[in-house]
Amino acid sequence: MKISGYTRLDGSIGFRNHIAILTSVGCANDLALKLGRMYPNVLVLTHRQGCSQLGADNDQTFRTLAGLGKNPNIAGVLVVGLGCETIPAERLANEISKTKKMVEYLEFLDDEGLMAAIPKGARILEGMLREASQMTRVPCGMEQLTLGLKCGLSDTTSGITSNPATGVAADMVIESGGRVILSETPELIGAERIVGKRATNRKVEEKLYRMVKEFKERAEASDMDLQEANVAPGNIDGGITTIEEKSLGSIMKGGSKTLQGVIDYGEIPKGKGLFFMDGPGRTPEALTGLNAAGAQIIIFPTGGGSPGGSLISPVIKVTGNPQTAHRLKDHIDVDVSSLIRGEELLEKAGERIFHRLLKVADGELTKSETLGYGSIAVWNIGLLCG
Amino acid sequence: MDIQKAIVLNEKDNVATLLADVDTNSMVQVTVGGSMREFRMRGEIRFGHKFATKKIDKGESVIKYGEPIGRATQDIEEGQHVHVHNVESLRARGDLL
């Protein structure tokens, strides 16, 4: 099975060929936005983190921002910061440059301020855009693909149609040599042992349970009640009987393969096969984490037709809800509502998703790409300390 | 009465999920492992809810997605509604770690 992409110097493959401006801190967003207005084809990766964070929270922000810059879909990055933040632009640029891709940085407080930074940034972006325009697609194998999975705006149809059909496609990616990242820790509650049983060894299994436990402890420390993730009256009314059934519906999108490893939010996994990434279910943070972990393409099953997208990677929206497929067809890439009508086998619907994935890898735009829908949000796990 | 449809997600499953509301005694078609089977409904069951595709004895696991989703608290006949009235969670809570 051959697809095509852009070869990067670290041996990875991008299925898109973006130039990006990445801020090391939220205070530099304005510079990125001004440059983005000059170059509409450049991705503007802004967020609100990068300063007054400590310890694990700061480490996570750094790892995530570096991962975004390293994502193979990006050919070149201009990192912009002020120079006074806890995540300096220079340090971030140095980490991203380990991939040997084009990386430059600007810290405009240490220089001559914003007005001087604009032409400097413009010149850097011009150079990168020209370089990127000379890159061409080459054939590659599925082992170059990291597929991210995320579901959103789930409804009664999700667990029986779009999630299991996505699971079939995820299994096909792994069978053809690729890597799949499942995430959303809160949606593992109640099904952790079912996923854990598929772990490649005891260490991976224990790590998965520890991750769920820590997620719940953080929630409890903030006086949040994660038991709300249990079966609610509305779920029971819709036909969901137990917590196992509810969580299984969600994890069904991860398919049936062996769990090879458990990774932190935004951590780039080593090896092929299925991985679980720690992280929240909220769409912008979940998609950002998957992109930081190296996902070049994301499949997103949805019941209600969430428009959520990613700037860095194509997001393939799948729905099994016939009304959503009809009413929100501008958001939906693959309609599997045939399953609800009993007109198609799950395996066939999964194969259709997989074939769309191959086309998207080859350059076909997804709905979220044509709509230009997406934003960056880094998962913040600590108090702001400054 | 029209024949209604349901979906079985895994060959190991002993329940099917209904794709429409059904009345007592109506017939429901399900594809299991490539072959079509028909079931007579023992009661009114709504869209999204489950019925047993084989007899499930009290204490036996209820299987959906190829995984146990709970345990039968009473004998469940083929075609009978499978839900909170005759199934209990094996986990009882989501946090038995």
Image (cartoon, coloured by chain):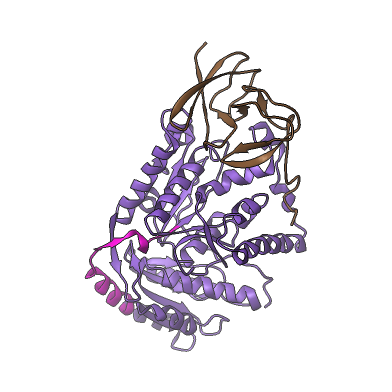
Chain colours: A purple, B brown
Q: Is residue A46 left or right of residue A155?
A: left
Work out whether residue A383 can be spotted. Answer: yes
B33 vs A300: above or below: above
Front residue (pair B58, B31): B58
Residue A358: x and y, percent? 32, 52
A211 vs B86: above or below: below
Residue A212: x and y, percent? 67, 59
Where does the magenta region start and end? Answer: A123-147
Quadrant assignment for the C terminus of chain A: bottom right
Q: Is residue A256 left or right of residue A205?
A: left
Quadrant assignment for the N terminus of chain A: bottom left
Residue A120: x and y, percent? 35, 82
Q: Which residue lies most toward the top here?
A: B1
Residue B68 belongs to magenta span: no
| Residue visible at 21% across and 70% down in the picture | A134
Front residue (pair A250, B77): B77
Q: Is residue A103 left or right of residue B53?
A: left
| Residue visible at 44% across and 63% down in the picture | A272
| Residue visible at 62% across and 24% down in the picture | B46
| Residue visible at 39% across and 65% down in the picture | A43
> Toward which corner of the image does residue A309 lie, by quadrant?
bottom left
> Toward which corner of the image does residue A84 lie, by quadrant?
bottom right
